[in-house]
Amino acid sequence: MSIPSVPTKNMFKKILIANRGEISCRVSRTAHKLGIKTVAVYSDADAHSMHVAMADEAVRLGPAPSRESYLCVDKIIAAAKAAGAEAIHPGYGFLSENAAFAQACADNGIKFIGPSAHAITAMGSKSGAKALMEKAGVPLIPGYHGEEQDAGFLLEQARKMGFPVLLKASAGGGGKGMRAVHAESEFHEALQAAQREALNAFGDQRMLIEKLLQEPRHVEVQILADAQGNCVYVFDRDCSIQRRHQKVVEEAPAPGLSTELRQAMGEAAVRAAKAIAYEGAGTLEFLVDKSGAFYFMEMNTRLQVEHPVSELVSGLDLVEQQLLVASGQTLTFTQEDLQPRGHAIEVRLYAEDPQHEFLPSTGRLRVFSLPEAEGIRVDTGYREGDEVSVHYDPMMAKLIAWGENRTQAAARLCQALEQVRVAGVRHNAAFLARILANPAFLDAQLSTRFIEEQQDTLLAKHDDKLNLLLLAAISRFKKNRPAPSPWDALAHFRIGAADSGSSKIELKGQVYDVNLTPLAAGHYRYQYESQAGECALHIQGNTAELNRDGKRYRYTLSRRSDGLDVFNHGEHYELKTAQRQGGNATAQDDQHYNAPMNGRIVSVNVENGSTVKAGDTLLVMEAMKMEHRIRAHHDGLVTAIAVAAGELVSEGQTLAEVEKTLVETKPS
């Protein structure tokens, strides 16, 4: 179903978008469709970004850190006034659920495209929201939601409910300030980390505690409400597949729910919205246990990252509806008018390294090509050449697939992920493709522990090493290669000669020797360690077809000055000409602990000369809105601390040294 927009004479002429990246671009597109001019805001890190280019005007806010730019209410209000914007769309994240920001808009005669400050306050406090839901008769998870925040008191509350428990920032969302605590011995460290993260993200370190449900599903309900008291629910979404309490895969409708459960959750969501005179788009989040019972978790008083799946199955443009409602228009449809069609699935493409505990990755996108195919929608705020900065969330894009049914949607999205071509940062495209192809996912066996339970399969590596080395070694000899070729630096080989030559190729920091002997008709005899055989390579444009020992393999290539970027099934490989001898090109001894990315040191937990056990936290660093713990690999003695709390560090910088404790053995 497609519900056309109904123009109103009161529609805004110009709005400011108080956000960045993908959501700013997405709001701009719909605003322009309605004939509304847009004003972007940007930090110094985003001066040349895609969201700035898409807007009709742009205003600088300040330096790169969010607290000096995107979180500055006074700067954003001043920018809106200077540009003559009648309204502000907050997107999601940053100030989108900040009641003080909504009130500041109202105080300055600017329409906040979202709920009132009162509604944000009512639902912005998890404790207050739960009290409101209790009055409305919505089931709640057992927990402590009070104001007392003494660490000893909170521990006692956790003991009463019994471990495991979940610590959650009272003022937060999006997984920030949230820690699962499985044993009492973990409580104080987890509490301190959650409080720090909550204070940094929301300016409020208050915590609530809930009993941690085992293997629940995370199901949420999209609502729309106007200022005249009308409210509908736009179906449900399953967001169970998560990592560190951050959603990874979202789909609509949630699979496997009974009609009665869907209706009960939808009606509960509408009751909640009406109880606070809600206006605009919002989401009620629930946990559903194996018995089908549902429990209120929180309300997000804003547009959700995963809103496209609801759009694709409803035919609505939710941003358009936000703009229409904010301009005073009444909803033009009722609950009975809304009927879901087909199935939609969304994944979040992150700059992160799944093979190394999903550490965020930063860098310049030297290749950034996302698929175009039937049933595929891509929402992004990045272009080739853009920088993925340490200052912001590492999400680069959202890929969304629609299908007549769940099976078709999953197949389309899996195929699209395998066509992702991104180089310059590490990313999770192949990891996401494995989720979409996983038998448990296809069978809708969903829970918030899905990734943990399936991680061995999801993190499995394709053994393409030999193919990649042959591809690199042969490609320099091809007559149709573009000039200049990065492989020209590899010597000791003559086309048409019968003698063999050795090529040194670097892959993932390791240098390998590959020996090739040319045969007739463009074929080669290869020797790599104990493996030998025949191969040939055909390159046309950016596509390479390798024939090795009678089997064919296809790859996509992008040439660099020092080598090749190779793409296959969502994976990316960097191949370089190498000057070093074989061996690990980036090896470190087990004594040094280096920064895994650019970031800031939050705390140093040990001193020079102290002894540590394997697993002890040496330092805590913050990068891309998350805390990361640097833990000891082994028992040992701290021999050096090279940084201090508050210091900015670069990827690869040495942070600490720990000398391994030698275990003495007595002679038998």
Image (cartoon, grey):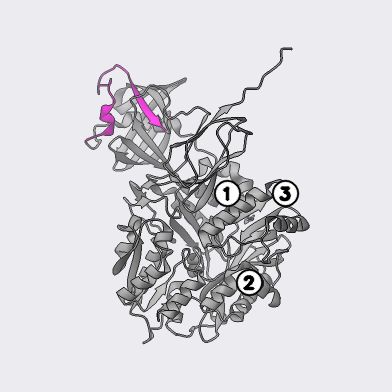
| Residue position for label 1 | 438
Q: CA distance from mark 3 to mark 2?
A: 27 Å
Q: Identify the mark at residue 129; answer none if there is no mark.
A: 2
Image quadrant holding the C terminus, namely top right
**Image spot of residue 459 (x, y percent):** 55, 42
**Image spot of residue 190 (x, y percent):** 63, 50
**Image spot of residue 420 (x, y percent):** 41, 49
Horizontal side of residue 228 vs 424, given as left or right: right
In the displayed image of the protein, which residue is found farthest to the top?
668
N-term mark: 2 or 1: 2
How would you rate the neighbour count of disc 1 (Cα within 10 Å): few for under 14, some for 14-19, many for 20 or more?
A: some
N-term mark: 3 or 2: 2
How would you rate the neighbour count of disc 2 (Cα within 10 Å): few for under 14, some for 14-19, many for 20 or more?
A: many
Eyeballing the image, is 388 above or below 112?
above
Magenta span = 484-507
| Residue position for label 3 | 184
